[in-house]
Amino acid sequence: MVSAATPDISFLIPAYNAEATLAECLASLQRQTLSNWQAVVVDDGSSDRTWDVLQGIAATDARILPVHQANAGAAAARNHAARLAAAPLLSMLDADDWLDASFIESMLPVAEDGSQPIIAFCAYRRVAPDGRMMPVEQAPMLAGDAAKREFSSFCALAIHTVVFPKSLFERMGGMDESLQTGEEWDLWLRMAFAGAEFRRVDKCLAFYRMKAGSLSGDPFKLVRDAVRVTTKAEALRLQHGLDVEGPETGWMTPGLSQLRMLAWAVSARLSPATEIAALAALVPVMPDAASHENFLVAVIMHGLRTGLLTERGDELIDALDKWQAPFLSLIDQIQQHSFPGTGRKIIEIACWQLSAANPLRSFTLGNFQVVSVDLGALSRIPKTERADSLIMHAFSGGLQVGTLVGPFWGDLSIRAQIRLIMQEMQATEHLPTPATLAYARSWTTEALRGYRGFGGLIIRRGRRRGRLKKLMGRIAGNALLATTPGDQQDNDARLSGILRDLEGRLSPRLAKPSGAGPEKGAETTTPKSEQEYWEQIFEHPDPWNYVSVYEQVKYEQTLNLIPQGIEKALELACAEGIFTEKLAKKVGRLTATDISQRAIDRATERCRGHDNVELRVLDFVRSDLPPEQDLVVCSEVLYYMKDEQMLAAVCRKMAAAVKPGGCLITAHAHLRRDEPRRTGFDWGHPFGVETIRQVLAAQPGLALEETVDTELYAIHRFRKGAVTDTVLRVEPHGTPMDVDVAKHIIRGPEGVARETAWETETTTSIPILMYHRIADEGPAALRRFRTPPEIFRKQMQFLRRQGYYAVTTPTLVDLLRSGRPIQGRPVMLTFDDAYLDFRTSAFPILAENDLSADVFVVTDKVGGRSDWDSAHGEAAALMSWPDIHDLHQQGISFGSHLASHAPASAMENEALLVEATLSRNALESRLGGRVRSIALPYGATDFRVPGILALAGYAIGFTTRPATATIDDNVFSLPRLEVRGDRPLEAFPELMGMPGAFIG
């Protein structure tokens, strides 16, 4: 007899009516490479020969301890066995399962009973009743809080794959005997929250025998007990203060975890008698499954493969009749509690996975019809009654030559199939050529129509072979279409009828508004000399808005630097005399000069009545300056010198014109090129105020006496003579500022100039940012969709500082169509819903940062309120048509957000086509130009939607999928990065791929 005095591990084995499998289970222990084990086998009131079999085996192996009890359930049997176990480590094994011979040898070195108990677990395989091995199932990594998170959602470990300390089992109070299923799940959950460490052994060491009639096969018990365990898990999470908020935590709500078990139970325990609605009613609060569609499909597919004992997708297609009805019933239950279109999305993903497993198979599931066509043997394919979405795989000579996904309107006649293959799949060259007289005639006709194409090939050189092949393919395809009949029930005919009916409902487009842009052929003159350049600048009065608050404050600060008692003064670049008039009151005699005669003429008119002012034309770069001046003033012009050599020459002239003891005053802006680490303008001048100050300070006899420094400019007074102390005064600049001035300001520390990025960088991706409201106040539940204006301002300043330039839809369409790398740092700014605060808050901030945007309009709601938000509080005001028209005139691009703000994925094909078309037409009629873009409300899309949007006349479409758009993306499913209003300001650089960069 084999015996083990002090075993290292005890196996807890409940046995109920297990006479057929118990011997094999125990034999797997007897084959272990390490023999120091114990098996406590509890006959749980079996009515067959289990006890006799057990006693017979135990009689020859003292390591097996037979125990008998009245039937009390598996949990009670395991608890009884644990009390009799002699080893410090335990493992639970069902009487119909078995272990690999190296199980103990592999697992024992990992499990450990210490201050922090260590639990070892391995992979396992299900075994079909006929002996087929199913794929290996590996548990997730369960380090740290991952164990608490995973066990809070589902049973991540099979019961017979785990080795754990007996002391921990006892501390947990054993298994919960009130649970009929999931008792091991409940145990692992409690162990995880008790601080146990779970370590994975990357080997498949356990085998689970699948058989009918097991207790865990009752779906009602599975769901009922899952609700109990997940409810307990939520209580433990709250007790331990674990946070589930945030996009990376991975925690599931109890409702989603319970839905997970519901989906598994329906899929794995298929039974025609199961009432799905009654099963779903066991879930206390059914969750919204939107955004969890891929996850649920994975659960369902795994459940189906488990329940049907299949490994391949095409085997699931073969068994479609067995599972389609309960599957669709489950989807109906999910959809009742979820965002519109969620159920359709689940079916879509399931169809795609099944079809991808074997594209040669045709089948229908719900609204989706999957067809496989052989181009050498095309035949008519009827549309099933419910189908509105098509997945079509085309094969030629056994090779797949294309796949189409899109809306489905009618039967697939041979002609309709050929058109789809030609126009949608671009696979014309794979279509066979019929040897018929009708085809030959049609080919000749098409070739004669395309004679210009042949002529072009003769004239043009290079790539003739490729062009000829494409031309011949088009001729052959058109000839084939012309000789293949269609009918009134096919896909093309039904769609044509819908489009004809729709055309009659469209409004005529309004004429282009006057003043919308320059006429073609408008000529601009290029100045030939420096003087002509400035004459052109002064063609219109006050070209720089010198009467603005910003300029007036600067004038006052300059005047405050002028000493008392100035007799003779010279003003260079006086422009139209706005400052001249003020300066004349502070000095005895003033000579004011400018290079432009137009400017001097206007200055003369303005200074009429000031007898102490002489105005004259003077090019101070090329001409001498009047000498012996008590004061020379020269502002906002020295950075027009082409280089520092020219600047130095002019500065020498000005210094020479000041008599000893006199002053030179100059005011110029801070430029980023000159001072990259501080706020400044991005004008293209070669230098700014700092270089000008340094060059002036280097002139013999000149000394800096006083400076007024602001965020945007500095005013310097130099003295010709000795200066004891230099005075620095920091003062504010005038506000508000003109947009034409503000848009050139780059704020904050050093970044990247747009010009530099344009010259040195290329990219194949574009971040498309998604905003909704730009406002401080609103319903708390909608905080995510509301960015405060000051936060928005800092975000736009960040983009400006980092060299981004905004692209709008027309430019983006061209960039994506070109397929070429994009220069510089493009960004697209999009705003959904067309809230009124876009005009009042967002647009001024965009304009002051030299950025534009695309706004998506809910066309039936223009001028009203966002009633789709009303469930959360007061609905916000939306822009009116005059608002939209005015912003369009100022460069804002507008697109559609549909007419009703309904999710596209919840609409029937024809309804979506009609609404999308009418919404685009409404915008075009109001704006007088083509509208090419659409952003789908809620980002709700599916396989049909891109094709329908193309039919509705759009060129580009945006979703809410969170990613950076690339030139390889589907143009109707472009992703966007949501800028959330409930995230800290520092999250914005991270969103732009620049974590830690300065903002604010």
Image (tube, grey):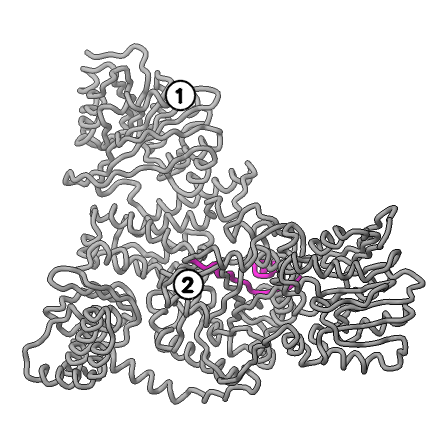
Q: Residue furthest right?
A: 565
Q: Is residue 571 magenta?
A: no
Q: Which residues are magenta?
A: 765-787
From the viewer's side, name the closer residue of 524 and 793. Answer: 524
Q: Position of residue 815 (x, y in %)?
A: 41, 66
Query: Which element is circle 1 on?
Result: loop
Task: Identify the residue at image location x=88%, y=67%.
Answer: 568
Image quarter hosting the N terminus = top left
Q: Residue furthest top?
A: 5
Task: Identify the residue at image location x=65%, y=50%.
Answer: 677
In the displayed structure image, the side of residue 251 where residue 356 appears, left or right: left
* Viewer-nearest of discs 2 and 1: 2
Q: Position of residue 671 (x, y in %)?
A: 66, 57
In the displayed structure image, the side of residue 542 where residue 893 appears, left or right: left
Disc 2 marks a residue whose amino acid type is Leu
Residue 79 quadrant: top left
Whether residue 345 is visible, yes or no, is yes
Reply above or below: 853 against 607. Answer: above
Q: Position of residue 293 (x, y in %)?
A: 38, 56
The residue that disc 2 covers is: 974
Task: Identify the residue at image location x=25%, y=53%.
Answer: 271
Residue 112: mark in rendering: 1
Disc 1 marks a residue whose amino acid type is Glu
Q: CA distance from mark 2 to mark 1?
A: 51 Å
Q: How many marks?
A: 2
Query: Which element is circle 2 on?
Result: loop
Give the mark nearest the N terminus, 2 or 1: 1
Q: Is residue 778 magenta?
A: yes
In the displayed structure image, the side of residue 700 where residue 310 appears, left or right: left
